[in-house]
Image (cartoon, rainbow, N blue to C red):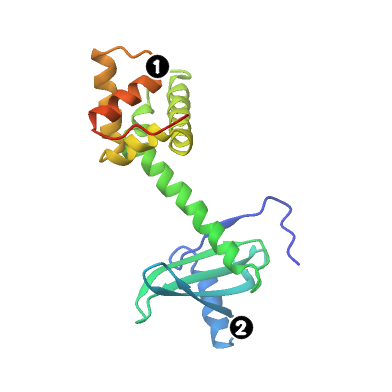
Amino acid sequence: MLNFGYTHFILVCKPDSHKILYEWLEELETMQAIQTVTEKRWTGKTHEIDTYRFVNQVPLRDGDDALEVNWCELTTTSPDGKILCKNAFATNFKISKNNVKEIVRDGRTRWKVENENNNTLKTKGYHLEHNYGHGKKHLTSLLLTLNLLAFLFHTVLEIMDDKYKLIRDNLPTRQTFFDDIRALTRYSYFDSWDAMLTFMIHGLELDVPDTS
């Protein structure tokens, strides 16, 4: 039973950054000590095959004091055997056939949040990186906080505001949406946020959703 004494983790585990661990995995594979779970999944267009492999308590590095982790891997293939994606994770959750799918899902979700959300903040109109270096005290932190709040509000709007979602779905990019709002509010006055969205919907020749 592992006892780490701190928060649980599920982290990406690659062969080039964890060479000792993968040497152990190669040895364990020859001993047929790595467990496997295979699942056939329908995507709506085709079948894909998910192969989960896992083993518990392998050293993360060399040395008697090396941290022991539990390792799992997902390989997704097409019916003809072509590899579509491959991910591996190290965790301190004990892995079994009953939970390996959920552990991989959580690990991929963490990766998705880090990569897709951060990428959106950097390249989709929020200009996150441009905030760094401004001011001598707390201006950078203030600008970063405003960026994160804007992203949070926009995410909520996409879920709860039908007019906002309709406009976003019909504009090519998030940056286009921001540019349109900037141009409209520079030259026109709107009584409310809802009035501006309605104006934009008419401009795009769309049907205004019934929000009653």
Q: Residue 141, percent across and down?
A: 47, 25
Closer to us: 24 or 84: 84
**Location of mark 2 (residue):** 33
Which residue of the protein is positioned furthest toward the bottom in this rendering?
Answer: 31
> What distance separates the C-alpha of mark 1 from that of mark 2?
64 Å
Q: Which mark is residue 192?
A: 1
Say which quarter of the image contains residue 42: bottom left
Q: Please give left or right for residue 120 compared with residue 64 in the image.
A: left
Q: Is residue 26 above or below residue 192?
A: below
Residue name at image x 43 percent, y 66 percent: 16
Q: Neighbour class for label 1 at 10 Å: few (<14), some, many (≥20)?
A: few
Q: Residue at x 54, y 83 (%)?
A: 29
Give residue 198's position: percent from left, percent from top.
Answer: 33, 25
Q: Nearer the viewer, residue 127 or 134?
A: 127
Q: Element type at marker 2?
A: loop
Q: Residue at x 32, y 41 (%)?
A: 169
Q: Secondary structure at mark 1?
A: loop
Quick check: 176 left or right of 19?
Answer: left
Q: Which quadrant does the N terminus fall into?
A: bottom right
152 lies above or below 146: below
Which comes before the other along the chain, label 1 or label 2?
Answer: 2
Given contact means CB atoms under 8 Å apart, are the residues at marks 1 and 2 in contact?
A: no
